[in-house]
Amino acid sequence: METLTQTTVEFDLAEKPVRELNQELHNPTATNYKVLNPRGEHSVAVGINDPIEVEIEGDVGYYCAGMHQHGTVTVNGMAGPGVAENMMSGTVHIKGHASQSAGATAHGGLLIIEGNASTRCGISLKGGDIVVKGNMGSKSAFMAQAGRIVVCGDAGEDIGDSIFEARLYIRGEVASLGADCVRKEMREEHREELVQLLKDAGMEEEANDEAYVDSFTRYGSARTLYNF
Amino acid sequence: MRSPEDRGLRESAIFNRAAIAAIQQAAETGIYDIRGWGAKRDVPHFDDLVFLGSAISRYPLEGYRERCDTDVTLGEMNASKPMKLDIPITIAGMSFGALSAQAKEALGRGASAMGTSTTTGDGGMTEEERGHSSKLVYQLLPSRYGMNPDHLRKADAIEVVVSQGAKPGGAGMLLGQKISERVAEMRTLPQGIDQRSACRHPDWTGPDDLTLKIQELREITDWEKPIHVKVAASRPYYDTKLAVAAGADVVVVDGMQGGTAATQEVFIEDVGIPTLAAIGPAVRALKEMGVHRKVKLIISGGIRTGADVAKALALGADAVAIGTAALIALGDNDPRWAEEYEKIGSAAGYYDDFQAGNDPAGITTQDPELAARLDPVEAGKRLANYLQVLTLEAQTLARACGKSHVTHLEPEDLVALTIESAAMTGLPLAGTDWIPGRNGGF
Ligand SMILES: Cc1cc2nc3c(=O)[nH]c(=O)nc-3n(C[C@H](O)[C@H](O)[C@H](O)COP(=O)(O)O)c2cc1C
């Protein structure tokens, strides 16, 4: 990897199969990739393990950027279920909306969703961070163990059901909280981490706007289900 | 004092001592019973079948001398690096967390000595385990504890766990006393909490999604590795068909007797069907799809002897997996700990409190002192010996039936001793040509 000079390679999924794309990305010969015509294909850019940048021009199906490590994947379109599932590090950036189970079980890294995230976003989250600029669907953050989820819009029903140590920052309305998930005090350390997450997600202006930051509420575990 | 039986007292078959004790415990505590091991009730099993051996119309192979192979290869259809096992007996998935690091190492040593695989479990892959297992299957479970793409790439095969025989529809459980610092870190959870895993996968539901999940796993690992799908025996005919349609290289069917580290008693005893009943429907599914012996079938749940192995193969399985028996081979329930078992309210031969974390044999524990009782090298040798015996026994039976490979055993080599087992397996009742429910039955 270190020896690569900055180059961009175009990869057209109308001409070559996903399998070839993934094999190229697993042994990259360039630092930057532009993927054309994804047309809802599944498993696009999964298992990346190098600090490469991949830009996908269109909508993707299931599990785009699954188990992602080190690199950056940007989807200039919509993402199907399980985008960035179990990601470990790096960044995945969805410019449109994301379907259900976005960022499921992510252990690290940052998932940014410019639009809305559907149900079960951040389910079983294990240390990754998710910033949803729109709204987030019901059953999100179910059993979330660690990591942070920021929602700039509203959230659906049963948010954070059986949540462990993950922290949720939600700006808008929450339809309902799940079992053992409660509203929590926003202390200075929480404000700081929220500001940082907003900045990481490219929301510099909002992050510097105190009133904007103040409009978030923190949610987390009441820890009453930890032992039988 | 004379025993109650000697004094003419009569125990109820329905309200027997175990049932009475369970009611008393429930009344006292208000908590349901959670334990390890598998179903303890009597269900139709491999004991209800016998081999016919050879006679005038069939001739055997020379018992000790003639070749009888035992190898099986998994994943030839889709994986560029299929997994070749020297014997058709694998070690089932048992998590680090449920088991000590030493026990996991011992399993790796024993299995590797015999050229077969071990399997990770609900809690990720440890270095000890990878280091001591020459062939390691990495489980993808609903909880995804410790799920790591680096480990995925290091594995020799991948097993998508849908459900377990001990608890179809239920999920993993690890009580607080076993959540040591290391276990907590691997699972990203606070130390000491009661950990109850999810029972459904977080990012797929249903057969169509499973197809895409398997595709993703193949894409991440460059189509190198065999992919297993493990399902509890509940609807084995449909589940096998769906797993094959989803792209599995190997279908693992785990019967209701299958062991567990910690599950509600009511789940262990009352959900799922016996191993014996599950094999036939799974084989029928594979045959109807034209992939029997191509997509491999691994059977588990109550395998104890080479006869059990041979019977499973004769019914159409390609290999078996063992959990409980492997732990016993390592030293679980050893009479040398009899006094200590008594102290914690159990007895050698009865111990099933794998959830409790105070295992006198040092196997199902995270207590460093107890765990140190198990010498991984010595325990690994015991497991290798045991696997060797299972293999030799299966070979002996296969030769007696005239087969030069253990997987050449066939249903025709077996008959059933009970009507139930005949009906479940589709084998004729011994001494008759009657298969209940088939040829003119009721
Ligand atoms: C201590 C213990 C831990 C287990 N942990 C797992 C696990 O993590 N994942 C899994 O799929 N099955 C697990 N199992 C089930 C085994 O993989 C296997 O299905 C079962 O033990 C087979 O039945 P047998 O014990 O009768 O051989 C566990 C079983 C035991 C005894």
Image (cartoon, helix red, strand yellow):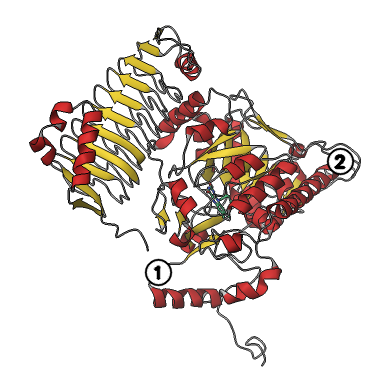
The quarter of the picture where residue B65 lies is top right
Picture disc at residue B31:
1
Looking at the image, residue B408 lies above or below residue B350: above
Image coordinates for residue A126, horizontal then vertical, percent: 37, 42
For label 2, the residue is B58
Instruction: Find residue A10 and report its horizontal and vertical position in percent.
Output: 39, 7
Q: Amino acid at mark 1?
A: Ile
Q: Amino acid at mark 2?
A: Arg
Q: Which mark is residue B401?
A: none
Q: Is residue A47 above or below residue B406?
A: above
**Which residue occupies 52% across, 28% down?**
B247
Q: Is residue B394 left or right of residue A24?
A: right
Q: Within 8 Å of ligand 1, the CB of disc 2?
A: no
Q: Is residue B124 visible?
A: yes
Chain letter of disc 2 in the image: B
Left or right of residue B350, residue B25 in this image: left
Q: Secondary structure at mark 2?
A: loop
Q: Residue at x 42, y 23 (%)?
A: A43
Mark 1, secondary structure of its residue: loop
Decide which of tag 1 and tag 2 comes sooner along the chain.
Answer: 1
Which mark lies nearer to you, 1 or 2?
1
> Where is residue A68 shown, x and y percent of the image?
41, 28
Q: Nearer the viewer, residue B266 or B416?
A: B266
Query: Can residue A156 be spotted in the picture?
Result: no
Residue sitting nearer the eye, B8 or B346: B346
User: A160 or B437, which lies in front?
Assistant: A160
Left or right of B398? Residue B303 is left
Identify the chain of the residue marked 1, using the numbered disc in the image. Answer: B
- Position of the N terminus of chain B by quadrant: bottom right
Q: Is residue A107 above or below residue B222?
A: below
Q: Residue at x 37, y 17 (%)?
A: A53
